Amino acid sequence: MTDILLVLTTVAARADADRLARRMVEQRLAACAQVSAIDSVYRWQGAVQAEGEFRVLFKTTAARWPALAQALRAGHPYELPAIVAVPCCEALPEFADWVRAECAAGEGAGQPSV
């Protein structure tokens, strides 16, 4: 088990996905962010919805999770965003070291802005 987390969220617009991805990496809350177009089917306010969305996958550390979650929530366009962290059970040691190094440079910095 590593301390690396894969954090996921979805947004409706590509511009929002790109904005969140860039800001979280710039603030060193994540080492990397990947944006993918997806199709979502979900129930919202009593009705089944089917829409295109963009999934953003962030690679971060457990230490940076609280600040990343807070920054995503603050900058997210959805009323109730899905922001989830999945522990990365295994990773190449060199990759895990890179994620740690990229995220560690931001630890102790001021409050992230979104």
Image (cartoon, rainbow, N blue to C red):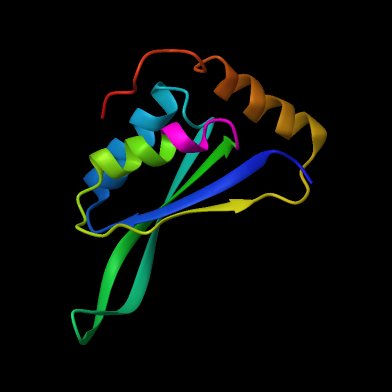
The residue at the point 19 percent across, 58 percent down is 79
Q: Position of residue 38 (x, y in %)?
A: 38, 66
Which span of residues is magenta-colored?
A: 62-67
64 drawn magenta: yes
The residue at the point 68 percent across, 26 percent down is 98
Q: Position of residue 14 (x, y in %)?
A: 26, 50
Q: Is residue 40 left or right of residue 3?
A: left
Task: Name the one closer to the observer, 36 or 23.
Answer: 23
Q: Is residue 74 above or below residue 103?
A: below
Q: Position of residue 41 (x, y in %)?
A: 33, 79
Q: Is residue 106 left or right of residue 5?
A: left
Q: Is residue 112 above or below residue 56?
A: above
109 drawn magenta: no
The residue at the point 57 percent across, 48 percent down is 6
Q: Is residue 16 left or right of residue 94?
A: left
Task: Name the one closer to the observer, 57 or 68.
Answer: 68
